[in-house]
Image (cartoon, coloured by chain):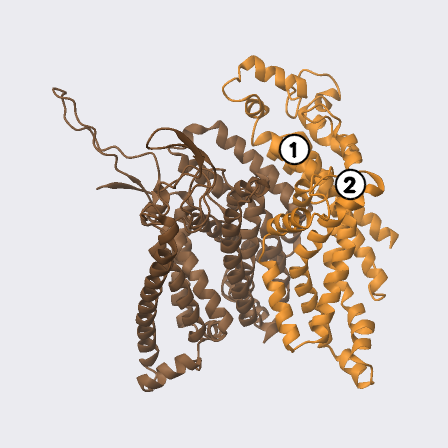
Amino acid sequence: MGFQPVVLWTDLLLFVLLATAAAAVFYVRANEPLREAWRKVGRRPAGMAAATILLAFVTIGVLDSLHYRPLLPAVDTPVGAVGGQGPPRYSTEVLSVLDAVLEPLRLQTEKTYSAPFAWQLYQRETIELPGGGQVRDYPRLVHGASHLEDPVADKDADLSRRVLAGLGQALFAWLATFVVLATLVWRGSGLGWGEIVAALLAGRTVLAWRAALVTLGLIFAIVAICIELAPLYHVLGTDKVGQDVLYLALKSVRTALVIGTITTLVMMPFAVALGIAAGYLGGWVDDAVQYVYTVLNAIPGVLLIAAAVLMMQVVIDTHPQWFDTAAERSDARLLALCFILGITSWTGLARLLRGETLKLRELEYVQAARAFGVRTPAILRRHILPNVMHIVMIALVMDFSGLVLAEAVLSYVGIGVDPTTISFGTMINMARAELAREPMVWWSLAAAFAFMFVLVLAANLFADVVRDAFDPRRG
Amino acid sequence: MLAYLVRRALYAIPILIGVNLLTFVLFFVVNSPDDMARMHIGVKRATPEAIERWKVERGYDKPMFVNAAAEGSARFTDTIFFDKSLRMFALEFGRADDGRDIGQEIRDRMGPSLAIALPTFVLSLFVSISFALLLVFFRATYLDFWGVVLCVAMMSISSLFYIIGGQWLVSKMWALVPISGYAPGLDATRFLVLPVLISVVAGMGSSARWYRTIFLEEISKDYVRTARAKGLSELAVLFRHVLRNALIPILTGVVVVIPLLFMGSLLVESFFAIPGLGSYTIDAINAQDFAVVRAMVFIGSVLYIIGLILTDISYTLVDPRVRLE
């Protein structure tokens, strides 16, 4: 085997989350009211478009969560040495499938800053002329546009040719998707294929497929153009140490997703269990739970997070022996951050659930169950839990975007992810000093801004649609 | 009312004790003072003597909870727990790592924090509520639709970008105000305009949308229909009835933060180099000055509890039906 798989803790939790999501899909398919609620989500164009974008981000995140350590090339055994080849040795560098896909981007580093699509470095350097002598000029990039003989004359033509080629491929892929989707909708619809195509194009299908298709078309176009251009140019420029900004932005997606999803995953069991218990059981349980969440609430969130992260940092720094690789170390820090954010954010959900449970326990069917002698755990499981799940669901999607934004701020402040973890916060942090340069280096910030904006906007729109569909008060 | 307030104040005590214990566990039990010393000195240079010296200098050399060597009440008062934790109730915060008195520092820095937080608070309340009322007035029109879209888009931008973008545009491109800094007295206005403006804009998206939801919920109630049937104009309905009745849910969210205004904003203060409590906290976090962070946590929770009590009082002022008993 040419590699050794590595499963980091956050990977594991992310896969657990995906499996749960898959199980939930099966459950929803069998449950008519839930199916109807989700259909409501699908009917809204904003919901479908946002879901398509989120799916694209999730794909990036999942690819970036399949980690492995590549095999090091075998060292030549010296002549006469006994034993021949030892056990295979793996690199201490942990890579992901996304790294492998983006290999040209990851490895083609320049010396320092270069603008998007540039062929020259951003800084003047002393260049040795071939015929002797020196000149101070912007040197050519090692990788960016290095395939061009005469960049000044050829660059524009080369760019437009490649963009067109990319668009062509995107169109082709989009048409293929369209045909597959039309066929899927057509099957079991009882209509003619042509009618289905017409309905899709006019946006007259039950689910808002047209919005999804338009979004997908845009994503395909951007991806195809990047596939054409990225190996030859630095599409979004390079940062201070010459790393491709597009690569950094794509790698940040996983960090954002991990923070946004795993945090809610770790806090949800606490919030649900404690909130329901407090609401249903009342008495001292209620007092205790209320006390705990008032105490946690009383501390301003950022400060509690700061305090906890500082402590975690000391623990991690004083126990280097716990971690084999740097990736495991920064992963531990990421996971710790998820836990800390989770601990500070479960209180709101718990309070909501407590209130809802107080209401539910007085309803007739719950009282009937109690009168029939159904035991408390069974009532909680069968009658209370399913009827508060929509609140959990809404809280889950609503929290996501807030957590993504929080990660950036916390990492910027220095109490977020490990500085070696690529995230939007660390990207912004590094880009901040560049703004003072003359002329300004704007592309790192712009890239972080654009990626975050699209991700958070999609999450916000999706959350809105989900809330509208699941909140009974918003019929 | 008074009895209620006294009871609430008494109820605050167990919560403060809880906060205190929690921070104590976080700062001293999760990591021993030895670990902290090692961090501060640097793992490579941390000899046992250096660690011991560091601990003695900062008073971390005492036993944690019970001092077996001491006599009488000193068995419990001559401990880390008493020195570092219980003393906070008397607002004695001790010294920061740079040797300065934390209490004095907090008193000095409260002013600049308030100077920026108070105008921000008032202005953003005013702007967001006005905007929300505007959207509600034009509800179910294109203006409402695009207004909400604008709100969602504004919510989706990280506050970091508002600050960075605002500084770049206003200070650097237009050169209207200094990029950062602070001056005491009236000179401060020059430095405060931009941070206040940015904070207001950054918070507008989410709060305007939230107020809009509250107003819409209120406007669907029966008394509003009655008021309209009576022949009141839409504006009169909005301002005289809906706004007043929507104040209760708005107060719930808003009054709690008033005392916290003293703490300032971490981000804005540190970006604009304003010597308030927010930037103090950030500096302490970066310097890993645990004493300062602990003090700020404690003060924050005290202020939060004051905020909760203020919220209750404000209810009675807005809604005569609410009686505190």
Alpha carbon of mark 1 to alpha carbon of mark 2: how far?
A: 17 Å
In this picture, is B135 found above or below A289? below
Q: Residues within 10 Å of mark 2 (few under 14, many from 20)?
A: many
Q: Chain of mark 2?
A: B
Specify whether A282 is left or right of B8.
left
- Chain the render paints brown: A
| Residue A162 sits in quarter | bottom left
In this picture, is A170 found above or below B291? below
Residue at (57% x, 12% y) in the render: B49
Residue position marked by numbered label 1 in the rendering: B284
- First of labels 1, 2 by sequence position: 2
Residues at discs 1 and 2 both on one chain = yes
Mark 1 or 2: in front is 2
Q: Chain of mark 1?
A: B
Q: Which kind of residue does numbered mark 1 sit on?
A: Ala
x and y percentages locating residue A68 in the rendered image: 32, 42
x and y percentages locating residue A303 in the rendered image: 64, 41
| Image quadrant where one finds the C terminus of chain B | bottom right
- Chain the render paints orange: B
Name the element at disc 1: helix
Specify whether A373 is left or right of B61.
left
| Image quadrant where one finds the N terminus of chain B | bottom right
| Image mark for residue B112 | 2
Name the element at disc 2: helix
